[in-house]
Amino acid sequence: MASIKEVGRGKCRVSWYDTHGKQHRRTVIKKAAQELFNQVSAQRIFEISELSPKLGAKARNIKTMTVREVAVPYREYLSRTRAYRNVSYVDRIIEKWGDWRIQLVTTGQVREWLYGFLNGPVREGEMAVSTVKKIARYFYRIFTYAIQELEILSQNPLTGLINQALRKEFRRVKKRTKTINTDEFWALIRDFPKWMRRVCIGAWCTGWREEELLSLKWKKLNLVERLIDLEADETKEGDAKKAGIEQEFFDVLIEIQTERVPYNPDDLVFLSVKGRKINQNFFERKFRKLADKAGFTDLKFHDFRHCYTVRKRREGHDRSVIKAQTGHHTDSMFNWYDKVDQFEIQEMAGFTQVSCEAIQDLIDQLVKTAKDHSIPLGAVQALIGRLWRTAA
């Protein structure tokens, strides 16, 4: 079974055989050797009595199992969650690495594969950095799921996959800074169909994702206390969260209630014109088309999430409260959705948008008068400076 032998200088050698008949030896200090000996002996007793898995079963799985065998169960699990749209990343991993034995998958080989997507032409075009980043994350999560949930592996072969160099490449992800103010929002949805306008108002007032709104049910709403409550399995983050119902959204919900169709088995809040669940892909295409027509090119529905974060932060709400409603776990993710523009910087210096516009009109009129009367512009520069100082 196992043996322990003192080899001098305060050290002992522990020897044992695994289930394959292979002998193992380890030389450590006396205290650690005794702990190892007790552990190995107890494990062997469990094996004989069939009270626990055989010694080395998880390690043997790493040698014999393929990536496909652990990726497919994770893919099935992912398809049942809010992240079901990310199944395509797992499919790409299975397509390339599915037939590889887990033992042969190394961080170096996977990094080289990821660098190929980042720096070279792939399928007639370079892949977006954000896409490659998700592929790397999900590759690591496949093995984590096999360890924690399936309990068939003992270690993750991709530990340390995202090193400093790869992390630097991932920082090349371009942050979307497309946001609109309140006036622009109401101008945008003015000509939208009623059913789509209602969903947009919900996103504007909650900062929630499209799939969370389109799947929202009446039983999750508390119109008396003006709260929406989602369970952990109903959010992409996997954590329960709440949202307050602003007045504009509250008016929309009351309007919908007065028009509720008698047959709504799914209890959905937002329905299509035909009284059915709104298809997410159709909604996205329709939104982009109408936004372009309204003059808001390159605006995505997900940008309302950015708009909500910026708007509430400018109103002076604590970022912890904003994160609780939007579902952002970290400050770095909050900062990703936040945006500081030039008008806020001007306000910090004492200039508001209104004052800037008023002073600019005066300066334009002054310059025009100087040109009409052939007065050198240098002669009015001091006056322009005094105007700006007065506004400050």
Image (cartoon, rainbow, N blue to C red):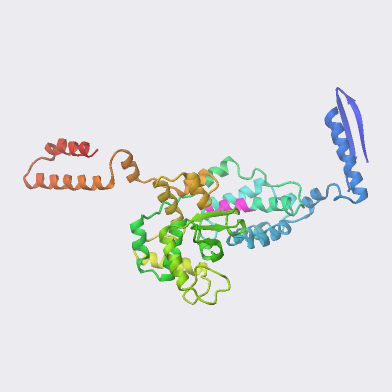
Tell me: 104 left or right of 227. Answer: right
Residue 22 visible in image: no
The extreme front residue here reads 224
Position of residue 376 measured from the top left corner of the image (x, y, whole percent)? 10, 40
Tell me: 59 left or right of 271. Answer: right
Residue 13 visible in image: yes
Rendered position, 195 above or below 345: below
The answer to whether residue 137 is magenta is yes
* Marker count (numbered): 0
The majority secondary structure of the magenta stretch comes to helix
Position of residue 5 measured from the top left corner of the image (x, y, whole percent)? 92, 30
Magenta span of residues: 130-138
Front-most of 377 and 269? 269
The answer to whether residue 231 is magenta is no
| Residue that appears at 11% across and 37% down | 379
| Residue that appears at 49% across and 47% down | 321
Q: Quadrant of the C terminus?
A: top left
Q: Quadrant of residue 296?
A: bottom left
Position of residue 134 measured from the top left corner of the image (x, y, whole percent)? 58, 53
Q: Quadrant of the N terminus?
A: top right
Position of residue 2 measured from the top left corner of the image (x, y, whole percent)? 92, 38
Q: Quadrant of residue 391?
A: top left
| Residue that appears at 86% across and 26% down | 11
Tell me: 265 left or right of 63. Answer: left
Rendered position, 137 above or below 300: above
Front-most of 215 and 228? 228
Tell me: 76 left or right of 290. Answer: right
